[in-house]
Image: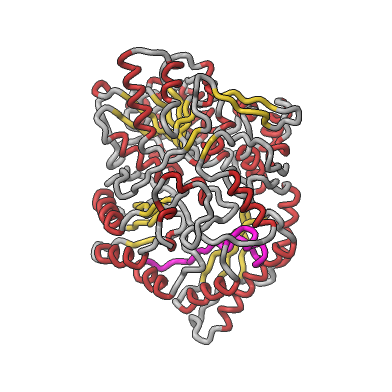
Amino acid sequence: MDKKRFEQLLLTVQKPGRYSGGEINSVIKDKNEVDIRFAFCFPDNYEVGMSHLGMKILYSQFNDREDIWCERVFAPWPDFESVMRQNGIPLFALESKDPIKDFDFIGFTLQYELSYSNVLNMLELAGVPLLAKDRTDFAPLIVAGGPCTCNAEPLADFVDIFFLGEGEQSDLEVMDLYKKYKHNGGTKADFLKEASKIDGVYVPSLYDVSYNEDGTVKSVSSKYNAPMPIRKRIETDLDKTYYPEKFVVPYIEIVHDRAVQEIFRGCIRGCRFCQAGFIYRPVREKSVETICRQAKALCDNTGYDEISLSSLSTSDYRDLEKLLNSLLEWTEKDKVSLSLPSLRIDNFSEELLEKINHVRKSGLTFAAEAGTQRLRDVINKNITEEEIIRTCKTAFEGGYTAVKLYFMMGLPTETYDDIKGIADLAQKIVDTFYEMPNRPKGKSVSVNISVSNFVPKPFTPFEFHPQITREEIIDKQQYLKQCIHSKKISFSYHENRTSFLEGVFARGDRRLGAVLLKAHEKGCKFDSWDEFFELEKWMDSFAECGLDPKFYANRERSYEEINPWDHLDFCVSKDFLIRENERAKMAKTTPNCRKQCQNCGANIFGKGVCFEKR
């Protein structure tokens, strides 16, 4: 690509920094000195992709190998995509500006179902055949990882290899196998058969799916002795797991523009709607010493003056007080602020508040999820209204005047009383503030309630439940608005149209590949962005393919039904999910993993919380 011409074209778009490359800590290698070129693609824009921790980890790990050059690729915003198409510029990698169709691997991280249309659009921009069956050459191989691979079926027609679970080891093992085939010769078909033998690797072309007359899955069978089921891969010892000492530092502002330090993986809680809480089991923690060493190196090598502790539930880290004390020893001196997201209401204390106030003062956010105790018990949130009110009171006494609470709408067994309960709880929090004799003087309280739409996901106890219809969601959103009577309470909610499509693809099967292809041909892309989402085009695509989206999103599923993902093993057994679903119907809670093991199946790895003393 001519450098001068490229720079001229960048001046015609809104944010040239998305495509210029050359950031601090980006990796440049001689392409003639490496065996494998890997294009790491994030199917959203630069600002979103550059905030993703998994990409940061694997980018650095791959590039630490002398024989691999990993480069970053992001979905071009429509203004630059138009420039690319008009000037015949194929999708390129940021570091070299080389077309990614010439790479050995094109890898996607699948974080959200509504990014699938961007996967196809990026492949088209790259000049790569979309369907795996049409890619007869050995390279590039299209691979994908991330949480959405727990139901990889909607993308099965397009992807050669899926990585299930955590990819630090399996990714490199596949690349080592590829390197062997590249140097010694061999066909793509033979390579894929051999790759399928690697733990955590799913090659969809090696499996056949048949369907019953009612549209449900009849059977899934493997070919060429491919494994069945295919089990996810995890890192069992996080103190020994690779973690980068530096991140690429962007020139433009990104969504999470700070250093990020992972402190553990998994979650002990077992909230029945939460896919991450099940597919990342078991909980494995890093030691305080490892966290502090890695966090210090990150700040030293990036210049960031803020570091965020990353986990699904930060306040569940066993040695949190010791960790914060250790971090404060150098963050205060270096003037680095500390961010603690994902705090639990039931273990939020005055001592923790003091630590937070010591390092950073901002609004507090908690996930209450449901407005009534009955529904909180159904979803196994394991927090009480008393704990919610007490936590907010503690925050107010600590000088906070703004609290944000997350809720969900459309949960199984939900009634309009549960919806009203959201408004009632918010009002009780407002009243608590004004009933405090020692409240901050001269200040008013602000309670923000943010309500998202429940989407049933694979490998959760609610995978069997239907998603409520778009009409029901709208009715409940309007009802909640009517139940709020205080100007101290603000209410925001999620667009229901995108939630519907998310529900379709979350529990979809391989037949959705045809719908996805049709929608791509109609121009669908950036579906997670409201300004680009066009539900009408999607509905037309379903109709043209003879599929009803409500079959996937709004239908209850029996325990006996074969789900499209049942041949993928994320080490949470279906029997366990059924038991938890039955307990949900009776509004019975289940203790967290540190209190009592529920024999979910995650102990098969022999590590983590499953083997802690209780």
Q: Nearer the viewer, residue 142 or 250?
A: 142
The answer to whether one can see residue 404 in this image is yes
Q: In this figure, what is the number of numbered marks?
A: 0
Q: As drawn, which residue projects farthest toward the bottom?
A: 437
Q: Position of residue 13 (x, y in %)?
A: 45, 36
Q: Residue at x 58, y 79 (%)?
A: 432
Q: Residue at x 39, y 40 (%)?
A: 55
Q: Nearer the viewer, residue 433 or 509?
A: 509
Task: Assign the N terminus to one quadrant of the image.
Answer: top left
Task: Assign the C terminus to one quadrant of the image.
Answer: bottom left
Determine whether, in the image, residue 95 is placed left or right of residue 88. left
Does 224 sit above or below residue 240?
Answer: above
What's the magenta region?
360-381
Does 220 sit above or below residue 110?
Answer: above
Q: Residue at x 72, y 67 (%)?
A: 483
The verdict on residue 362 being magenta is: yes
Q: Quadrant of residue 341?
A: bottom left
Q: Residue at x 47, y 27 (%)?
A: 161
What colour scheme has been applied to the protein in the rendered image? secondary structure
Q: Position of residue 265 (x, y in %)?
A: 42, 51
Does 496 sit above or below residue 215?
Answer: below
Q: Nearer the viewer, residue 251 or 594?
A: 594
Q: Quadrant of residue 447?
A: bottom right
Q: Position of residue 562 (x, y in %)?
A: 65, 35
Q: Position of residue 153 (x, y in %)?
A: 58, 31
Q: Quadrant of residue 360?
A: bottom left
The answer to whether one can see residue 519 in this image is no
The verdict on residue 98 being magenta is: no
